[in-house]
Image (cartoon, rainbow, N blue to C red):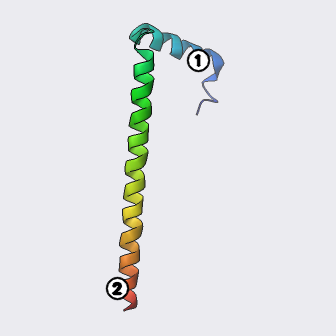
Amino acid sequence: MFNSIGIPGLIIILVIILILFGPSKLPKLGRSIGESMKNFKDSTKDIMDDDEINQDEKATKENK
């Protein structure tokens, strides 16, 4: 994903983010993005686990 952007592109993106949000809000922004990604990952894991349980239940019902 970042291979096509390159180092100069990343620097430009970081400078724009710094200008938009300011240095005092960057840690809060990073923390909230990290928490959002963690919640999304946990939610998708729960959904995948539920799908596996449902498939196992269907398989046991078909075998009976």
Badge 2: residue crowd in 10 Å (few <14, some 14–19, many ≥20):
few
As displayed, is residue 1 above or below residue 24?
A: below
The location of residue 1, given as percent across then percent down, is: 58, 34
Q: Quadrant of residue 4?
A: top right
Question: At 40% across and 34% down in the image, what residue appears?
Answer: 35
As displayed, is residue 22 above or below residue 4?
A: above
Please tell me whether mark 1 sits on a helix, a strand or a loop: helix
Question: At 44% across and 16% down in the image, what residue appears?
Answer: 26
The residue indicated by pointer 2 is 61
Q: Quadrant of residue 31?
A: top left
Labelled disc at residue 9: 1
The location of residue 3, given as percent across then percent down, is: 64, 30
Distance of mark 1 from mark 2, alpha carbons? 55 Å
Q: Quadrant of the C terminus?
A: bottom left
Labelled disc at residue 31: none
Q: Quadrant of residue 45?
A: bottom left
Q: Check the image and name the residue furthest to the bottom.
A: 64
Please tell me whether mark 2 sits on a helix, a strand or a loop: helix
Question: At 42% across and 68% down in the image, what residue appears?
Answer: 52
Q: What residue type is labelled 1?
A: Gly
Q: Identify the mark nearer the N-term, 1 or 2.
A: 1
Q: Which amino acid does label 2 sit on?
A: Lys
The location of residue 46, given as percent across then percent down, is: 38, 56
- Decide if residue 3 is on the left or right side of residue 28: right
Foreground tag (1 vs 2)? 2
- Decide if residue 9 is on the left or right side of residue 32: right
